[in-house]
Image (spheres, helix red, strand yellow):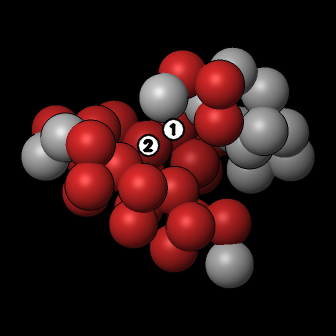
Amino acid sequence: MLSRYYHIISKNRNVIKPIYLKKRDKHDKIRPKHGKKHEF
């Protein structure tokens, strides 16, 4: 659910962002709201 949410937002903002978020999502799965959501 969160992955899709970030992916959609990233796609609207940038094309490189989604890949970065996708890779980061695996590491920051426990706290994906830390810094990620505020980065946009």
State left or right for residue 8 relative to residue 12: right
Q: Amino acid at mark 2?
A: Leu
5 versus 27 height, above or below: below
Residue 24 lies, in percent from the top left, at 51, 38
Residue 7 figure quarter: bottom left
Q: Which residue is found at the position 57% from the left and 48% from the top?
A: 25
For the N terminus, give its image quadrant.
bottom right
Circle 2 residue: 21
Q: Residue furthest left?
A: 15
State left or right for residue 3 relative to residue 33: left
Q: Which residue is found at the position 65% from the left and 36% from the top?
A: 37
Q: Amino acid at mark 1?
A: Arg
- Disc 2/disc 1 C-alpha distance (Å): 5 Å
1 versus 21 height, above or below: below
Q: Which residue is found at the position 51% from the left and 73% from the top?
A: 4
Residue 28 lies, in percent from the top left, at 70, 38
Q: Crowding at label 2, few (<14), some or many (≥20) Cα neighbours within 10 Å?
A: some
Q: Is residue 18 visible?
A: no
Q: Are marks 2 and 1 in contact (CB under 8 Å)?
A: yes
Q: Which mark is residue 8?
A: none
Query: Which element carries disc 2, helix, strand or loop?
Result: helix
State left or right for residue 33 relative to residue 16: right
Q: How many marks?
A: 2
Q: Which mark is residue 24?
A: 1
Q: Nearer the viewer, mark 2 or mark 1?
A: 2
State left or right for residue 4 relative to residue 14: right
Q: Is residue 29 visible?
A: yes
Residue 2 figure quarter: bottom right
Residue 8 lies, in percent from the top left, at 39, 66
